[in-house]
Amino acid sequence: MKRQRIGALLVVATLCVAIAAALGLRLGSTVVDGQSSAPISRNSQVPRAADGHPDLQAVWNFSSLTPLERPAEFSGRPTISLAEAAQYEKSVMDRNNADRRDGGANADLARAYNDGWYDRGTHVAIVNGAARTSLIVDPADGRIPALTADAQRRAGERAQQRRDHASDGPEDRSLAERCLGFNAGPPMLPGPYNNYMQLFQFKDHVIIFNEMIHDARVVPLDGRSHLPATVRRYLGDSIGRWEGNTLVVDTTNFTDKTNFRGASDRMHLVERFTRVDADTLLYEFTVDDPTSFTKGWSAAVPMKRTDEQLFEYACHEGNEAMVGILGGARYEDRQKP
Amino acid sequence: MRTKVVFALAGVGLFVAAAMPVVAHHAFGGEFDANRPVLLKGTVGKVELVNPHAWIHINATEVTVGGEKKDLKGAAEEWAVEGGTPNTLLRRGITRDSLAGNPEVVVDGYQTRDHTLLRANGRNITFKDGRKLFMGSSGTGAPKDGADPTEPPK
């Protein structure tokens, strides 16, 4: 156990040193120059870096039982009382409980293995003291706005492609199955496990390091522009700046392969990181893509500081599931008359 | 049909709290066959706590597949049984040493879609006395998420 923890620490430390070295940074140095001329209000509860900006460095847990979109049972109610929230938490945990065996073979298989392996968190999102019924805060109904006709056409084409070529080869399978993307985003959203993010803060960069898939986004804060539009990335191209006490990360240059919630490669993502108290990092994001959504939409995810460390995920190296999926498809091909 | 729903959800990376439980890294219906339930009785052999999914090897002396008990002719079959990410286990203090001593277990799961492989998911793995191999996280026992002010300090 100890060796594994040390190993995981070494992996994280090595990665960070390598990234920092590549950027010409010096680990352990403090942030000395502010990037923003905006006045910074002092809040004694929030740790500060030497330059006065909030210190966002910590391991943050963003698990949450609040769904992205508001369930029908809470229609018209963005927030609920803490007592209702406790009741809802219990009902969601009961529903998600992978130890239950009801619902037929397909539902049973979808739960995959017992609940010991899952780590979805145990609480709803509390934002500004109120229990949220959806992570989406805009539009007011807590739902993703309707897809445009163009986005519906693209979604239909992808669905048809999946039907016609479900498992011909690895590239027919989802990015998650290929270890290329998951709920680490961007944007980050709570998932079934590995909901941990570590933020490293330097003078000219921050690093947003996710346990899931082991994505490390290196975000420059030096005022540079986005990459040329011809350069497209799974994680997009992120540039950051300080707006008062908030770190703002602006991301464009996505590919058409991630299609987050139906978005196109023209998705414009703005993430905002605000340390609202010593133990809470409020993570807010806005998705803007007029080619895909009939209006922009925003969500808020409170992240809690934790003493946990990030463990190595190394998804691709042990991805025997891909072999199992494609091997199973070929086996079924051979069984066909 | 429900399998297809899971496919579609996994394909676009959606994670919703719906009637269907949230899926993990891959669509289980793509890898395993819901029509091939397996029941394995035997001892734990090699334990691979690797990501994205752990594999626990079982030296099975009693194998029931699709409701039919196999005649092993006195030999044992080695089955590889898939679990989830070891990271959650590590956070609960569970390591490969937790399964030392080749304990006897019962595995209740589903075989891979390729029926020639001795592979299954570990839908439920229990010790001989009925205790679950890994305890669930519902209610108490989950790694602390820090959101509950009444949680005792770590």
Image (spheres, rainbow, N blue to C red):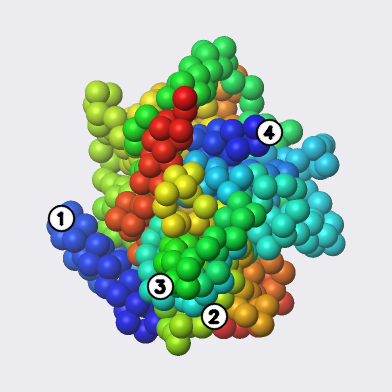
Residue at 61% from the left image edge and 34% from the top image edge: B5
Q: Which residue is mark 1?
A: A22
Q: Same subunit under labels 2 and 4?
A: no
Distance, label 4 to label 1, CA atoms, is: 41 Å
Distance, label 2 to label 4, CA atoms, is: 49 Å
Taking the view exactly as shown, the residue that stands out farthest to the front is: B73
Q: Which mark is residue A58?
A: none
Residue at 35% from the left image edge and 77% from the top image edge: A4
Residue at 30% from the left image edge and 66% from the top image edge: A12
Residue at 75% from the left image edge and 59% from the top image edge: A94
Q: Which mark is residue A143?
A: 4
Whether residue B63 can be seen here: yes
Q: Which residue is mark 2?
A: B104
Q: Secondary structure at mark 2?
A: strand
Question: Residue under mark 3: which chain is it in?
Answer: B
Q: Which residue is mark 3?
A: B47
Q: Quadrant location of residue B80? A: bottom left
* Viewport quadrant of the N terminus of chain B: top right
Distance, label 4 to label 3, CA atoms, is: 43 Å
